[in-house]
Amino acid sequence: MKQLLCTIPAAVAALLLVACGKPAPIESVESLVANPERLQELRAQCKADHAKVGDAQCNAVAEATRQRFFGSDGPKYTPPSSLPSSPPTASAPAAPSPAPPSAPKD
């Protein structure tokens, strides 16, 4: 009986150590930007099972996707330097006006 009591805490301690293992290393944003095949694979994994892959890795995947789409500096939008005072109007062709009725000739 005494041996059983000593074995139970050892088993519990072993289970706790296994459960508290180090998390898998996270691939960096830079490495994912440089390797589009791996990025695509991880995007599919995050979509299929976000909880299994983990928030940190899926956030890195999202950032790498954003950087590949926009570039590392963000979007390259430059607003126009001057706006017209009034918006251009589209002129539709005018419909011909009906001819006035002519008086009957006798």
Image (cartoon, grey):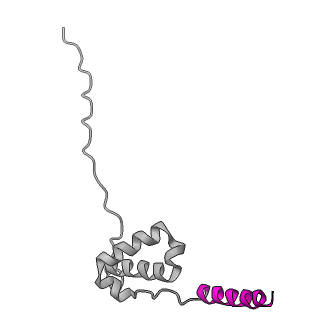
Q: Residue at x 24, y 17 (%)?
A: 103
Viewer-side residue, 72 vs 17: 17
Is 70 above or below relative to 98?
below
Viewer-side residue, 23 vs 88: 23
Question: How far across and how far down the image is residue 78, in percent?
Answer: 32, 80
Q: Residue furthest left?
A: 106
Q: How many marks?
A: 0
Question: How far across and how far down the image is residue 38, in percent?
Answer: 33, 78
Q: Residue at x 61, y 84 (%)?
A: 19
Location of residue 16 (image quadrant): bottom right
Instruction: Answer with left or right where residue 12 lies relative to residue 64.
Output: right
Viewer-side residue, 87 vs 101: 87
Res. 77 in view:
no
Q: Residue furthest top?
A: 106
Location of residue 9 (image quadrant): bottom right
Q: Which residues are magenta?
A: 1-19
Instruction: Answer with left or right where residue 104 lies relative to residue 8.
Output: left
Q: Is residue 21 magenta?
A: no
- Taken as a whole, is the magenta stretch helix, strand or loop? helix
Question: How far across and how far down the image is residue 2, in percent?
Answer: 80, 90
Q: Residue at x 18, y 8 (%)?
A: 106
Q: Residue furthest right?
A: 1
Res. 37 in view:
yes
Question: How far across and how far down the image is residue 49, in percent?
Answer: 50, 69
Q: Residue at x 68, y 86 (%)?
A: 11
Q: Is residue 14 magenta?
A: yes
Location of residue 65 (image quadrant): bottom left
Viewer-side residue, 99 vs 104: 99
